Amino acid sequence: MTQPSDEVAIGAALEVRARAIRAKDADATISCYGPEPVRYDLAPPLATVGGQARDRGDLIAWFDTWRGRIRYDLSNFSIAVGGDLGFAYGFVEIGGAKQDRPAAHTIWVRQTVCLRKLGQAWKIVHEHTSTPFYMDGSLKAAVDLAPPGAIEKTT
């Protein structure tokens, strides 16, 4: 494959994962990761590694906190490829109706993903998802932000 087609393949792999998350399909979501991924996710702990990062039960528990489908839309992703490593970063809009809230809500997060070409497939080997927090001493997460050009939503 040439580099441009690798970039297309990485974008497609990220979209496959996004569709799996939207459908709350744990097995399809996990299949997007390499055998020993490292994830820095929104929820504690600070890092999950290897088998823990591929834990089907943790993923299902998170899916179960949502009523209906999850909104998980990728936005403004940039992709670069060098050999068997790919790097992508952008924003993700996550939303929907939570089990413990009467109304649906949406937040924007930042995401950086490193992928490795394993055989003919691009697999996620590192993922970092985060939200900024206000530096005013409150330590409050800045979940009211949206990337440039996006319609800001309230939570």
Image (spheres, helix red, strand yellow):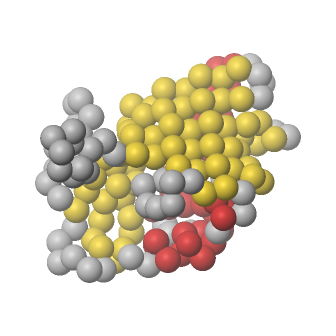
Quick one: 24 or 128, which is closer to the camera?
128
Q: Position of residue 132 (x, y in %)?
A: 30, 42
Q: How far from the left and from the top, in percent, is residue 100?
A: 26, 80
Total labels drawn: 0
For this view, does 148 lie left or right of residue 130? left
Using the rendered view, name the quadrant where residue 10 is placed.
Answer: top right
Q: In terms of depth relative to the viewer, which is nearer, 77 or 113? A: 113
Whole-percent x, y for residue 51 in the image: 72, 63
Residue at image location 34% in from the left, 77% down from the top: 67
Q: Is residue 68 visible?
A: no
The quadrant of the rendering that contains the N terminus is top right
- Residue 65 picture quarter: bottom left
The residue furthest front is 137
Front-most of 109 and 133? 133
The residue under the point 53% across, 49% down is 40
Tell me if 51 is positioned left or right of 130 in this view.
right
Residue at the far right in the pictured view: 119
Q: Is residue 15 above or below residue 99?
A: above
Name the residue: 46% across, 61% down. Answer: 44
Q: Is residue 69 above or below residue 72?
A: below
Q: Residue at x 77, y 22 (%)?
A: 83
> Would you place residue 140 above or below residue 83 in this image?
below
Q: Is residue 62 visible?
A: yes
Q: Quadrant of the C terminus?
A: bottom left
